[in-house]
Image (spheres, rainbow, N blue to C red):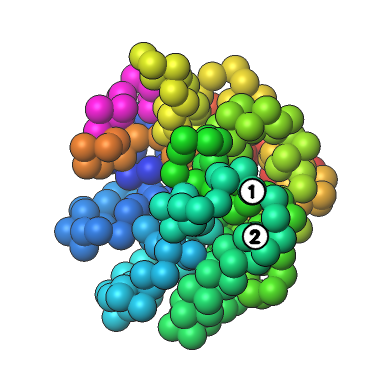
Amino acid sequence: MKIAVNYSIEAEQLVKDTVIDVDMFKCPDFSKELIQQAERTKPCYIHFGLNAGSGQLNGVDWRLIKEIKNWTQTPYVNVHAVAFSKQYPDYDVLTDKPKHINLMVDAVLRDIEIVGKEVGIETVIVENVICRGRGENMMSSIINPEVLSEIVNKAGCGFLLDTAHAQMTSKCLGLNVKEYISKLPVYNLKELHITGIQEDEHGRLRDSMPMTKDDWELASWSLEKIKTGEWQKPWVVALEYGGVGPAFEWRTDKEVLSKQVPEFYEMVKLNQKN
């Protein structure tokens, strides 16, 4: 089980200075130059910005995706299972009607089929997204564990668990996060993302933040499930803190990285020992 952190200039420098260590950097897919820069310090794998259920995957540059997948030896192509509320304007965001759910599932499966034809269904993994409830952009059905399990089972693909997405969804919808995660298709877990969540100045939750006590506890619980064999062991566990570009640079703190990456690394290593 590899240990990764989001690539950032700060993380790169800390690795060079031997302040932190990881097996790999997790890189976005939008810049070959960024990947080349990151690989001068550590091996990289790619996190793709693909949405299954959006109906837009026919317009993707598959030649480029395959090129950077093969170049970095990234074993899986991830997709986010989505059902945007704007796609279903006549439905309540919290709808539980089978007819509505089936439409969303079918849309996701159609897109996964496109990805599978391009890269092989055995290399496709589906990630859980965030649902914040009414007035927001994601239909609740698409984060339902039964729905996600149906998608994974019917498609024959793997699962990428994002614990921060699960935390935010659970807090917004009034769910118990551990019960919620336990019902997700962790029996086919291929990749695990862990990061902190915090409220902004308006009380809105956001992820890719420094880890808090609750975040560490959930991370420890998740790793214990892998250690005991209750969940399938993923190929990589990534700390999704920091990054590049306007969305991430402002929340990339060198002090946080220098403190929390070693703690994360040690936690994962300890959980791999018998």
List x then y, in percent, for residue 243. Answer: 31, 40
Please check the rendered image and state whether residue 122 is part of the magenta-colored stretch, yes or no.
no
Judging depth in this view, the residue of 8 and 151 nearest the camera is 151
Say which residue appears at 25% left-offset and 27% top-offset. Answer: 250
Residue 30 as seen in the image, left or right of residue 91: left
Say which residue appears at 38% left-offset and 72% top-offset. Answer: 57
Image: 203 above or below 197: above
Instruction: Kindly identify the amino acid type of the residue bearing the numbered disc 2.
Output: Ile
Range of magenta residues: 249-260
List x then y, in percent, for residue 90. Answer: 50, 53
List x then y, in percent, for residue 126. Answer: 56, 61
Image: 79 above or below 114: above
Q: Which residue is mark 1?
A: 95
Q: Which mark is residue 101?
A: 2
Tags 2 and 1 touching, CB below 8 Å: yes
Instruction: Kindly identify the amino acid type of the residue bearing the numbered disc 1.
Output: Thr
Choose top left, top right, bottom left or bottom right for residue 35: bottom left
- Does dot 2 land on a helix, a strand or a loop? helix
